[in-house]
Image (spheres, rainbow, N blue to C red):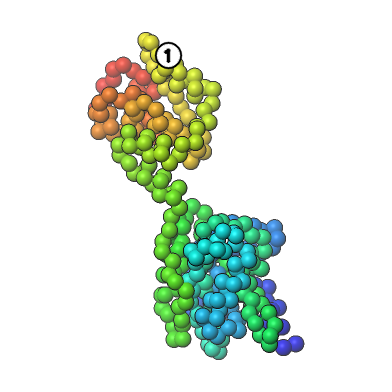
């Protein structure tokens, strides 16, 4: 059995973080990807480590990496110059053997089973196409982590404490956020209620899925209301399903976010008050507001 065959007996559990001769830094970046057909990887950005590589030229490795991965990304990304972005670093083991860290970012998400097979780097040796190494470790961003932070932290790790013989390759990837994230940030940060409504209507024109009780409450209190006290409406549900956005999408609302805001209540001509993320037991004036009292003393 030659050295080439011995290298490929690795189960892929070896990673750059545990390799002698290379900086051993327990980085908190990303979430490790488990291997096996039962595990599915979904995402756009991947932090990949290749140990036991036989490619000594980082530019050759870069070219082979791109050519190998192209077959497994979205067809639109293959023809787009920005469809696959790659930035990485080659480091050396104590015996002079190369070791690679790679950050790849694609425009369209992929869902991969056996992810290590999808990112194997194929090289040419003795006029034959062979896999460079199967000692591959993959990380994706943590649940809830912003894409921009994952990308910046990964690239910062690449350039920190570069050792002798280390070589960067590819083009540094600029921090990115999706258009959806940018639009939601605008909506959340906008202090003016009318502008908030305009942003929602512009970027999220999809009709709301209104339940029968919600529609009845709206009609009774806004469309057909004649006299008597109004009624409050409490919406319960998981975060991100549009409860607050719907409540802000009609009339001229004011919004109390997590607590009391006299500035909001001093605004003129508002039609209703939206209480968001309130712990009502701790909210001093919850009874008056939820009861839609015509008059209330609040200090």
| Residue at the outermost top position | 227
Residue 69 image-quadrant placement: bottom right
Mark 1 neighbour class, 10 Å CA radius: few under 14, some 14 to 19, many 20 or more: few
Out of 198 and 291, give the one closest to the viewer: 198
Q: Is residue 280 visible?
A: no
- Of all residues, the one furthest to the right in this rendering is 1
Above or below residue 286? Residue 43 is: below
How many labels, in total? 1
Instruction: Judge from the rendering whether residue 288 lies leftward or rightward of residue 126; answer left or right.
Output: left
State the image coordinates of residue 195 (x, y, percent, origin top left): 33, 37
**Percent x, y for residue 289?**
35, 24
Q: Mark 1 — residue?
A: 224
Give the left or right position of residue 181, taking residue 3 as reference. Answer: left
State whether residue 215 is above or below residue 34: above
Which residue is drawn at the image coordinates 54% and 89% (left, top)?
96
98 is higher (above) or lower (below) than 237 = below
Quarter of the figure that contains the C terminus: top left
In the image, 22 versus 279, the foreground residue is 22
Q: For this rendering, which residue is in front, 5 or 66? A: 66
Q: Residue at x 32, y 30 (%)?
A: 254
Label 1, secondary structure: give it. loop
Q: Residue at x 60, y 84 (%)?
A: 54
Q: Quadrant of residue 175?
A: bottom left
Residue 264: x percent and y percent? Answer: 28, 32
Residue 219 can be seen in this image? yes
Quadrant that contains the N terminus: bottom right
| Residue 149 drawn at (x, y percent) | 43, 60
Q: Please tell me which residue is depicted at 50% across the width and 32% down the height of the picture.
A: 208
The vertical placement of 24 against 174, above or below, is below
């Amino acid at each position: 059995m030659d050295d080439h065959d011995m290298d490929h007996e690795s189960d892929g559990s070896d990673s750059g973080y545990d390799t002698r001769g290379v900086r051993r830094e327990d980085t908190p970046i990303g979430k490790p990807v488990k291997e096996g057909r039962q595990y599915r990887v979904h995402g756009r950005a991947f932090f990949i480590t290749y140990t036991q590589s036989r490619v000594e030229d980082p530019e050759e490795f870069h070219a082979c990496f791109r050519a190998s991965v192209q077959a497994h990304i979205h067809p639109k990304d293959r023809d787009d110059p920005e469809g696959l972005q790659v930035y990485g670093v080659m480091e050396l083991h104590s015996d002079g053997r190369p070791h690679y860290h790679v950050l790849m970012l694609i425009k369209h998400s992929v869902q991969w089973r056996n992810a290590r097979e999808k990112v194997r780097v194929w090289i040419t040796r003795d006029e034959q196409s062979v896999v460079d190494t199967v000692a591959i470790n993959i990380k994706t961003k943590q649940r809830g982590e912003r894409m921009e932070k994952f990308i910046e932290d990964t690239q910062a790790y690449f350039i920190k404490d570069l050792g002798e013989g280390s070589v960067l390759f590819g083009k540094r990837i600029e921090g990115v956020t999706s258009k959806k994230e940018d639009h939601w940030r605008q909506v959340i940060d906008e202090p003016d209620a009318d502008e908030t409504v305009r942003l929602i209507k512009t970027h999220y024109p999809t009709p709301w899925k209104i339940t029968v009780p919600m529609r009845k409450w709206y009609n009774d209190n806004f469309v057909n209301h004649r006299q008597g006290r109004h009624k409050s409406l409490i919406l319960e549900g998981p975060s991100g399903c549009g409860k607050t956005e719907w409540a802000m999408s009609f009339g001229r609302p004011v919004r109390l976010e997590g607590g009391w805001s006299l500035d909001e209540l001093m605004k003129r001509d508002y039609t209703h008050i939206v209480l968001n993320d309130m712990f009502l037991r701790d909210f001093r004036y919850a009874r008056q507001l939820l009861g839609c009292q015509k008059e209330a003393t609040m200090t």
